[in-house]
Amino acid sequence: MDVYEAVTSRRAVRGFTGRPATREVLERALSAAAWSPSASNLQPWHTYVLTDEPLAELKKCTGERVTSGDPWDEPEYEQYPPALKSPYRERRSAFGEQRYGALGIPRENIEARQRAAAGNWDCFGAPAALFCYIDRAMGSPQWADVGMYLQTVMLLLRAEGLHSCAQMAWAKYHRTVAEVLSPPDELILFCGMSIGFEDVTVDDTRTGRAPLDETVTFIDGR
């Protein structure tokens, strides 16, 4: 698979088969991802990979919190600005309409939307999950480095025939994740990532992208 195919075929998959991703494949992808760029080679990412019984335990514990109505943990970072301006607000709204519209869930059915979102805590059935942390002392440029690292991971997973779904949603239950992973106190959970083989029987429409002229400006003297 060439890099263009990896980029264009990567998407947030929300339905996985139980077929396991082998330790060898995951190690190969993550070893190569270490070559992701980072300012002054800080490599500010701290990655945990869960499979088998530990992942099942995390799913169970988080599911119990969801079922009991336990509120989300106190956020440790702001996932979105409090008031998104245009065009970002419209893009986010369009994503929600497409995502839940494909599931036949109208905007006003909040309960059904919450049930659909609960699939996050089962990793959408994925047999492997990655959790990416960053040191609390790091600044915005290092968070950008982590983003480049995660994109590299996802592209390498595509090269291995795997799919993924990056999930900031896991930060809402960071205490439960920490109970299973026992990360050092100086680390903050940025996101999780479900990893596995796509269940092609799950209908999940891919979200489109803005046209090039909305996001790219060429200055070439023409």
Image (tube, grey):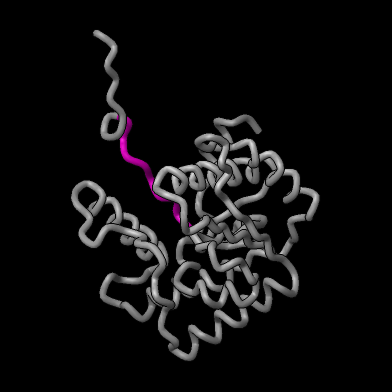
Which percent across, then down, holds residue 81?
27, 58
Kindly identify the residue that appears in the image at 53 percent across and 34 percent down: 40
| Towards the viewer: 59 or 94 | 59
- Residue 209, placed above or below residue 23: above
Which percent across, then down, holds residue 36?
58, 37
Please tell me in which quadrant of the rendered image residue 56 appears.
Answer: bottom right
Name the image quarter holding the C terminus. Answer: top left
Please tell me in which quadrant of the rendered image residue 1 appears.
Answer: top right
Q: In this view, does 206 lie to the left or right of 58?
A: left
Task: Please give the count of numbered marks on the rendered protein.
Answer: 0
Which percent across, then down, holds residue 149?
55, 44
Identify the residue at the far bottom of this view.
68
| Towards the viewer: 217 or 140 | 140
Q: Is residue 22 left or right of residue 157?
A: right
Which percent across, then down, holds residue 107?
28, 70
Q: What stretch is highlighted in magenta?
A: 204-212
Kindly identify the residue that appears in the image at 46 percent across and 61 percent down: 168
User: Is residue 175 shown in magenta?
Assistant: no
| Towards the viewer: 116 or 54 | 54
Kindly identify the residue that appears in the image at 62 percent across and 81 percent down: 60
- Residue 95, placed above or below residue 172: above
User: Is residue 205 shown in magenta?
Assistant: yes
Q: Specify the principal SS of the magenta part.
A: loop
Kindly identify the residue that appears in the image at 74 percent across and 61 percent down: 19
- Residue 206, placed above or below residue 70: above
